[in-house]
Image: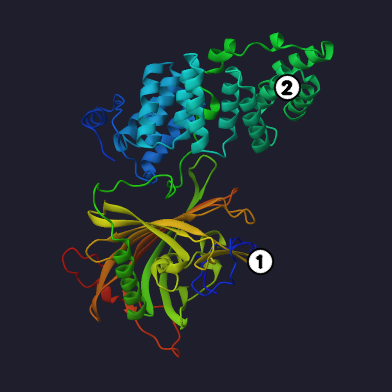
Amino acid sequence: MPVPCVRFTAGFLLAATLLYPFPMQLQPRQQTTGETAAAAQGTEAPANTGTVHSQSTVLDPITQKELNKALEALRAENPANAKKHLQLASQLAPSDPDVTYAWGMYYGETQDWANAEAYWQKTVLLYPHYPFAWAGLAQLDLRKNDLPKAIDNLERAVQASSSTWHLEERLAEAYFLHQEYDQAEKHAAHAIEMSGDRASLAQLILAKVYLQRNDSQSALKVLDTLLTHQPLGPRVNEARRLVTSLRWSPGLTQQTVGDGFENAQSAAFAMPEELVPPMRWMPLGVDEWIPPVEQGVACPLQKIQEETEKRIREFVSAINSITATETLEHEVIDVHGSPSKRESRKYAYVASLKEVHAGQYSIEEYRNGKMVQDIFPDHMRTFGLTSLVMIFHPAYSDEYEFSCEGLSRWHGGKAWQVHFQQRPDKPARLRGYKMGNQMYSLSLRGRAWIAVDTFQIVTIETDLVAPLPQIPLDAEHIRIDYAPVQFRTFKGELWLPQSAELYVDFNVRRIHRSHRFTNYMVFSVDETQKISTPTPKSESNSAPPEKKQNF
């Protein structure tokens, strides 16, 4: 069963694009003049609070390297070294939200609160779902003793990153300081549950909430858990003081705990460690950031779908085999978001796409004449990625919900921006992961950019609708770019994959792969022919017409 495929060394895991029917499982930026001038001088630009839209891309390796070094310096409380690397990163990406946020971190560490606020405000304008910037602004609100505003900003932070227990902990703290004890209890308990009893501040808050209710036994139980799991933690001294007080005075009162407001400013640490974000290594999800579209332009979704289906049908019927030279770049990503291992491979690539039964398609991929995982880095095999355009084929399109977001500018031209998502009442048949003999289907959501003039798919991106904890697969992001290729023996042109980017987060292992395809050749085979490694010479090496890309 053809499936894009990931297999670990011990045959643990296989991931793939499923064109063959799968058993039904229902329910499953713009740079400002000031920034340009500042970059040319090697200095940081003043924060610009104008609205700028950040694209959902990963920074280029050089910029990411400088940003990573800046964040490491901030963790080490070395702002001078951080500034040096931030200046270099700003030259290349002055309006990237990670870069502007890091400038806010720098100014926070140097206690220049006005500039810290300006840069964090700019960050949430660039990218409104940036949780660390909202949390940073909340810390500044706490410094001003503005608890309602701090709570509002922390609520935004939690909404943007609901799986980050540090943010839940900070929100519980703010509610406690504002004497909203029910909300403090709710968020403290959630933080403790998510952290596996590592949220020591949340445990202290929960104990104090119980004390507010004169429930010293529950408070002692929480504090004992804190001291058991973190005997040397940062809040041990306060926990031990409370335990001692409770042992001697079981009827501890609200006055002993304090009224809450007196500690608001002290709660705003100069630079809380949890405000240093993890290194970004995967692009923003398709629903985390929606690229801007032109205002007032009607979107003919039905026509777009009909015409795109025709292009996909033409592609399938025109060929049943292509060859190319494939270059693979494989990276293992460390905990800081930086590549810890790199490896490159080159293959003679052959792909065969055909209809095996009515409405049922099969894709086979060969690299150097083989279909085994041993020829891939880390014995991890990927295949079928480039066939994701079959989402728009009538054999599969009724399994997805489509919506047109509008007309956008993409790759120097105009394209219809179409969002899609797996329907919950239909089986997920296009992509899956295999562990042992068990295949797990993946429900996908994504976005496609479809050329206005040709209705060809220019770019397609996909994410998971939900993680797959059985593997465990926390996240997966795919981006494929297509471009026209002309052949001497084929009338017209075919839109074929130019590149494919795969980002996979297996919780304890992160992988990034880049696939590049060149030297395309197209041919047909009948059922009796055997696919073999293509000869190096490619028909597509002939000079293409102007404005047409030839691989």
Q: Is residue 484 left or right of residue 25?
A: left
Q: Residue 204's spot in the image, x, y percent? A: 68, 22
Answer whether residue 267 is visible to the viewer in this image: yes
342 displayed left or right of 541: right
Q: Specify the amino acid type for callout 1.
A: Gly
222 lies left or right of 185: right
Q: Nearer the viewer, residue 27 or 108?
A: 27
Rendered view: 397 above or below 255: below
> Which colour assignment does the render follow?
rainbow
Residue at the (66%, 69%) spot, across then down:
437
Please give the count of numbered marks on the rendered protein.
Answer: 2
* Residue displayed at 29% across by 25% down: 43
Amino acid on which disc 2 is placed: Tyr
According to the picture, the residue beneath numbered tag 1 turns out to be: 436
Distance (Cα) linking label 2 and label 1:
48 Å
* Quarter of the image with the C terminus in it: bottom left
Residue drawn at x 70%, y 16% as measured from the top left: 238
Measured as percent of width and height from the top left, residue 158 is found at 53, 34
Q: Between residue 286 and residue 381, name the one nearer to us.
A: 286
Dot 2 lies on which element?
helix
In percent of width and height, residue 39 lies at: 26, 31
Query: In what quadrant of the picture does the N terminus appear?
Result: bottom right
Q: Tell me which label, 2 or 1, sits earlier in the chain.
A: 2
Q: Specify whether residue 513 is in view.
A: no
